[in-house]
Image (cartoon, helix red, strand yellow):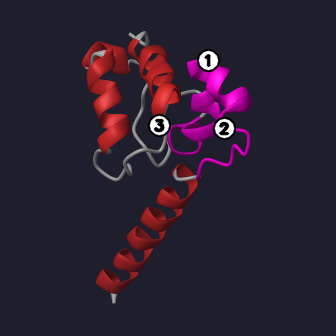
């Protein structure tokens, strides 16, 4: 019974976490404010539901010092390809580059 309960709980957390991190590209005008926004604004819109508004983690890991562990290119690779429970391409294009640059400065 414990195994079934744990499986149900972990499955629910995973589904809810992926749903919160997902989010499609709802820009009808081909970019608008999101395309020109800084990395922090994009992070707040697309990533904070999993990694926390303060970068300290929630469903996703703590990112407060992620720049000490990964370079901008490595962070961009994680954004594009996903890692662990993070799905790929949560943020794409220039937005992904801006987020990677902003996170790489977190040391």
Q: Please provide percent x and percent y for residue 81.
A: 30, 43
The answer for how far apart the CA atoms under marks 2 and 1 are is: 17 Å
Judging by the rendered image, the residue that carries numbered circle 1 is 38
**Residue pictured at 38% horizontal, 49% vertical:** 86
Q: Residues within 10 Å of mark 1 (few under 14, many from 20)?
A: some
Q: Compare marks 2 and 3 and give the one earlier in the sequence.
A: 2
Q: Is residue 42 shown above or below 21?
A: above
Judging by the rendered image, the residue that carries numbered circle 2 is 30
Judging by the rendered image, the residue that carries numbered circle 3 is 92
Q: Compare marks 2 and 1 and give the one earlier in the sequence.
A: 2
Element under disc 1: loop
Which region of the structure is painted magenta? 24-52
The answer for how far apart the CA atoms under marks 2 and 3 are is: 13 Å
Proximity of marks 2 and 1: CB atoms separated by less than 8 Å: no
Q: Please provide percent x and percent y for residue 38.
A: 62, 17
Q: Quadrant of residue 89?
A: top left
Q: Is residue 19 shown above or below 84?
A: below
The one of 28 and 68 positioned closer to us in this rendering: 28
């Amino acid at each position: 019974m414990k195994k079934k309960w744990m499986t149900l709980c972990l499955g629910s957390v995973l589904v809810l976490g992926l749903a919160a991190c997902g989010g499609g590209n709802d820009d009808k005008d081909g970019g608008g404010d999101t395309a020109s926004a800084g990395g922090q604004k994009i992070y707040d819109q697309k990533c904070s539901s999993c990694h926390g508004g303060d970068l300290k983690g929630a469903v996703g890991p703590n990112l407060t010092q992620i720049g000490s562990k990964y370079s901008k290119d490595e962070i961009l690779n994680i954004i594009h390809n996903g890692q662990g429970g993070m799905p790929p391409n949560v943020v794409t294009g220039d937005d992904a580059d801006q987020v990677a640059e902003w996170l790489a400065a977190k040391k």
